[in-house]
Amino acid sequence: MKVTIDPDRCVGQGMCVLYAPKVFQLGDEDGRAELLVAQIPPEQEDAVIQAERACPEQAITIIREKGSIVP
C-alpha cells in the first residue's frame, strides 16, 4: 500500500497524525501533512485507512500495490 497527500487540499488539521503518527507528520514550515515513509508497512495499513477517512479535506489517497485506489 502506498499513500499520497494532495498539498493543495491539505490545510494541516492533523487528523492523519492523530490516527497514524508513524506515517504522517505536520511540516515545520507550512503545517501541512507530510509522509514519514514511502511504503506503508502492513501493520500501519488500518491506521492509514482511518486517517484517510478522517481527513476533512479528503487530501489523502491510498493506492494498493497493483495501482487500484482503495474505496
Image (spheres, rainbow, N blue to C red):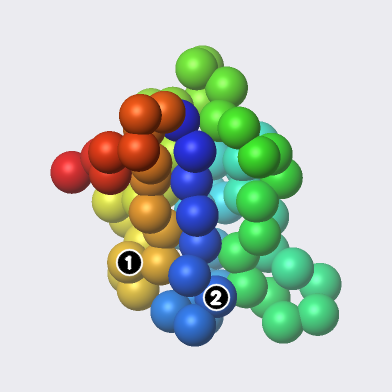
Residue placed under numbered mark 1 in the picture: 58
Image quarter of the N terminus? top left
68 left or right, relative to 15: left
**Residue 43, which numbered label?**
none
- Front in this rendered view, residue 39 or 43: 39
Give the amino acid type for the residue marked by disc 1 in the picture: Gln
Can residue 27 be seen from the camera position used here? Answer: yes
Residue placed under numbered mark 2 in the picture: 7
Which element carries disc 2, helix, strand or loop? loop
Which element carries disc 1, helix, strand or loop? loop
Whole-percent x and y of residue 29? 81, 80
Determine the image quadrant of residue 55: bottom left
44 over 29 or under it: above or below: above
Give the amino acid type for the residue marked by disc 2 in the picture: Pro
Q: Earlier in the sequence, mark 2 or mark 1?
A: 2
Determine the image quadrant of residue 30: bottom right
Whole-percent x and y of residue 59? 40, 67
- Front in this rendered view, residue 61 or 28: 61
Give the residue drawn at x 56%, y 30%.
40
Residue sitting farthest toward the right: 28
Give the residue drawn at x 35%, y 29%.
66
Give the residue drawn at x 66%, y 40%.
38
Determine the image quadrant of residue 63: top left
- Front in this rendered view, residue 20 or 63: 63
Can residue 49 be seen from the camera position used here? Answer: no
